[in-house]
Image: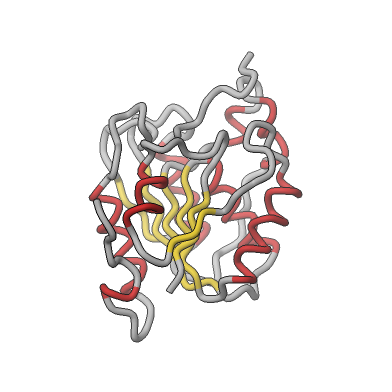
């Protein structure tokens, strides 16, 4: 089973848990956007769709704006073969439009239930989305909600490197699939948070 890493604005720097998972786990591929600094929903969505179609049955792992991109994909293409998704620290483009105008195309937030299992992990102290909003989105999307506590944006700036707790939730997503064992997706080989994007 393939894991597709879906970063948010600016991508995820080498110290970010998404980048570490890409190095440390088997069968992991990063979704690479042409322009990480000026996200455009139509372009980013087309890129993600390309990766998902090439990797049917993959688990998607999104962080920040990447989680919202996954939600848009689920809303626009409900018949895609997606095994599941781990959505971490979603960013609210409606809340942030005045501070980060380049993410405006990601609003409004998708309001369609997912056709695949998902887990949404949200912090109580995330500056990019209130936890109550994240909990509401999990209910709308049909995702399992996880209260991560007072952990900021769950990125390098908040002290999250390899983030072993996240691997636990990734395993839970994978266990919902029939005939998928631990070794099928988390064979460890070894061991970026959202910026302001021309903030006003």
> Outermost residue, bottom direction?
179
Residue pictured at 68% horizontal, 67% vertical: 77
Q: Closer to the camera, 158 or 148? A: 158
Asked which quadrant contains residue 152, the reply is top left
Asked which quadrant contains residue 92, the reply is top right
x and y percentages locating residue 33 in the rendered image: 64, 46
Quadrant assignment for the C terminus: top right
Q: Closer to the camera, 105 or 31? A: 31
x and y percentages locating residue 14 in the rendered image: 41, 38
Q: Is residue 105 left or right of residue 81?
A: right
- How many numbered marks appear? 0
Q: Is residue 82 above or below residue 62?
A: below
> Outermost residue, right direction?
42
Q: Is residue 115 left or right of residue 134?
A: right
Quadrant assignment for the N terminus: bottom left
Q: Closer to the camera, 182 or 150? A: 182
Q: Is residue 53 above or below residue 8?
A: below
Q: Closer to the camera, 181 or 150? A: 181
Residue pictured at 29% horizontal, 38% vertical: 161
Q: Is residue 119 above or below residue 80?
A: above
x and y percentages locating residue 123 in the rendered image: 34, 38
Residue pictured at 61% horizontal, 24% vertical: 197
> Outermost residue, front direction?
190
Q: Is residue 28 left or right of residue 189?
A: right
Residue pictured at 65% horizontal, 21% vertical: 98
x and y percentages locating residue 81 in the rendered image: 58, 76
């Amino acid at each position: 089973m393939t894991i597709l890493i879906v970063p948010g604005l600016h991508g995820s720097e080498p110290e970010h848990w998404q980048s570490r998972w890409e190095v440390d786990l088997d069968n992991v591929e990063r979704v690479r956007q042409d322009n990480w600094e000026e996200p455009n929903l139509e372009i980013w969505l087309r890129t993600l769709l390309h990766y998902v179609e090439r990797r049917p049955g993959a688990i998607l792992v999104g962080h920040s704006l990447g989680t919202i991109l996954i939600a848009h994909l689920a809303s626009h293409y409900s018949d895609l073969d997606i095994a599941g998704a781990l959505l971490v620290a979603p960013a609210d483009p409606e809340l942030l439009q005045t501070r980060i105008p380049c993410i405006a195309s990601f609003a409004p937030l998708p309001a369609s239930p997912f056709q695949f299992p998902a887990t949404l992990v949200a912090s109580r102290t995330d500056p990019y989305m209130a936890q109550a909003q994240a909990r509401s989105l999990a209910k709308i999307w049909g995702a399992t909600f996880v209260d991560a506590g007072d952990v900021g944006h769950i990125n390098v700036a908040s002290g999250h490197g390899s983030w072993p707790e996240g691997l636990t939730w990734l395993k839970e997503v994978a266990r919902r699939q029939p005939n998928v064992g631990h070794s099928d997706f988390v064979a460890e080989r070894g061991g970026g948070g959202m910026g302001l994007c021309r903030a006003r």
